[in-house]
Image (tube, coloured by chain):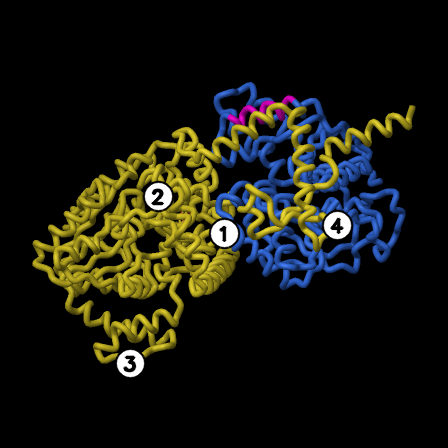
Chain colours: A blue, B yellow
Amino acid sequence: MNSEAKAVSGNIGLFVTCLADLFRPSVAFSAAKLLENQGFSVTVPIQSCCGQPAYNSGDERKTRGLAKQFIEQFEEFDYVVAPSGSCSSMVKIHYFDLFGSEPDWQKRSQQLANRTFELSEFLLDVLKVSLSGVDLNPSNGSEGLSDKPFVDSKITYHDSCSGLRELGIRSQPRELLKQSCGVEIKEMSNSEICCGFGGTFCVKFPEISTRMVDNKIDGIVETKADILLGGDLGCLMNIAGRLKRTGSKTRVYHYAELLALETEGDLVDDGIAGEKNV
Amino acid sequence: MEVLTHNFKPAAKKALLDKDLSAAMGRAESGFVDTRRKVTDELLNFEEFRTLGRDVKNHTLANLDYYLELFERNVIAQGGHVHWAKNGEEANRIVLDICKKADARKIIKGKSMVSEEAGTNAALERQGYEVIETDLGEYIIQLAGETPSHIIAPAVHKSKKAVTELFDRYHAPMGYETVTEHEAIVDQARQILRDHFCSADVGITGGNFLVAETGSVAIVTNEGNGDLTSCLPKVHIVTTSIEKVIPDMEALGGFLRLLARSATGQITSVYTTLFNGPKRDKDIDGPEEFHVVLLDNGRSEILGSEYQDILRCIRCGACLNHCPVYTSIGGHAYGWVYPGPMGSVLTPILVGRENAGDLPNACTLNGRCGTVCPVKIPLPSLLRKHRSDLVKAGSQGAVQKGMLSFWYVLARRPVLYGVLMRAFKTVLSLFALLDKAGQRGRIKTLPGASAWTSSRDLPAPGKSTFQALWKTAQSASNESEK
Ligand code: SF4
């Protein structure tokens, strides 16, 4: 294990996120594994939702109710880590604005925000796993990159908007994938353009959303990638759902699912919305 | 201009089916975005300019009365007139009065979104005036009987083919030949407009910036039509709005840099013109009369409100060009003068939120607009604020409200939530069985979720929720440790 990583220790509360809990448990299992491999004890406190859907629908009263519940569930941990840019950004950025008239809660939310991280941000920026030292899977035991999983696959990456613009997450997952799996991302021209998910947007304005995801898919197809990765399940379900509907063979995974693998053969299934979707 | 904002959804759906529109928007988007990136990257301290732009605008808005009066004094001192219009109707009345006094028949116009807002063309035409738009884009949509679909590129939605057809229909009877190439199209428009420039009685332009210190009105164009519109007819009217005022020339220098780069990806616009009152004794040209009509139309209500930041807008259009919703549906679907992110913030305030509730909701909050705005308007936060005000006013749809409340009650009871999510998973898995081709991997139709499943598969959930699986795994490992 990276020596620098030892400098940081403590209990991590895993912020599972609603979509991983319901649709893709393997994302949360992968996140837990990656964190445990770095020597942390990972706890999954009972949880529901951070309140983001209510917040983006403009219902601040309900958002505050859920935010308080979330703060109570998670404030005992040294760190809170989520495999999602948009969910961690909700806690990191938006909770503060919610409690303008409740200073006590604002303070508690800020303290929690300071200890809350998106997974790749935590691994790279907080634990500072470095180019030379990274080994996300100590049990792997492989030396050269040639026997890393996916070294031969063509992989492209979608940058989800909240993570990208609110938290500045762009290089971290790419860096980790490169270090740990030897994966070089084949960039699409529109990696930073919204896929049209937008939470309730995609069902309120389904036709516009479909056009946006089609534009995204044009970019993916151009790269001829056989795997699409990203860091937010909402976007990935949207893109994967449309890819499958239009008959594409491109498989879609959360980046954590790849990082947590030891060999290519360990993949749980054909990816999000794939034929075999576990 | 007529307010059609309540019609957003059907209008957007219709726009999505328009193949020419999609092609035109696609071309425009990449053009604007790429050129903007290039010139903003070149100006190494572009971010500092953005901050400065924000701060100068904030300062001016905080002292708006002072700067507006200073501007007025300086315009008058140069022999011009300043008129204050509470709303569009008043603005049009002022313009009509001036035209009547000037005994005008033909009126030529440079681009002015404020005049679109007031519906000035229609008001003039109702009184029998001939009105000719002289910005090429505006001229094209005037022929087509349409409204602008973009605040700086009004005909961005039109293909070259559509323009050829339009010119054929209107110009052929005047003896002009069919034009199919860009240069020939521009050339033909120029020939026709030249005659209008020389025979018009009144010229109306907009104003990009009003410089208080000097009483100057600054406009930027790429065609020079604004200059001809302002100095050939004997009367020049500027239709503009109160938030366009800035303190001084130094500020103008900064804003011109920001505007050209953000709008068209130019280092500077081709023509930058400052109007300083009517023709003076020794001037060789210029109008005999110079009027500035300052429209309020609800802006002073925004001042001091939670939405004040939108008054910083310099109408560059960058937020439109970077908005994936705008570039998918074009500008007309938004149903009023201002489309895209800035429009979705401004329109509900100016026409009434209850009429325009779809606009702030038709956004994924992806945040790209906020990162390009040259005066750092927090567009996504303002859109979210609208949503919150819509909820507070009870104008949320009943279904949406019901679903959100049901979900909230559950989410506030995490244990019950867990049980129900597991049950929900089981139900979903049953629907996955309907997908015969796949192996229960995805759901193709789901009652009540057609908005998703009509165009996308839904991944089938696995056996249980993560939380339940984790718990089982933890207790199993605890068992084995014992
Ligand atoms: S809101 Fe900002 S980006 Fe949009 S038009 Fe106004 S100044 Fe330009």
User: Looking at the image, do the residues carrying marks 2 and 3 touch, with CB atoms under 8 Å apart?
Assistant: no
- Residue A226 drawn at (x, y percent): 71, 59
Q: Is the same chain shared between marks 3 and 4?
A: no
| Near-viewer residue (A183 or B421) | B421
Q: CA distance from mark 4 to mark 1?
A: 28 Å
Side of B98 relative to A50 (left or right): left
Q: Is the same chain shared between marks 4 and 1?
A: yes
| Residue visible at 75% across and 55% down in the picture | A183
Dot 2 amino acid type: Thr
Task: Examine the structure image and report whether residue A64 is included in the region drawn in magenta.
Answer: yes
The chain containing the residue under callout 1 comes to A
Side of B75 relative to B409 (left or right): left
Q: Secondary structure at mark 1?
A: helix
**Quarter of the C terminus of chain B within the rendering:** top right
User: Looking at the image, do the residues carrying marks 4 and 2 touch, with CB atoms under 8 Å apart?
Assistant: no
Tell me where the magenta segment starts and ends, as one range. A62-72
The image shows residue A63, relative to residue A250, as above or below, that is above
Mark 1, residue position: A207
Mark 3, residue position: B177
Side of B24 relative to B220 (left or right): right
Q: Residues within 10 Å of mark 3 (few under 14, many from 20)?
A: few
The chain containing the residue under callout 3 comes to B
Which of the two marks, 3 or 4, is nearer to us in this view?
4
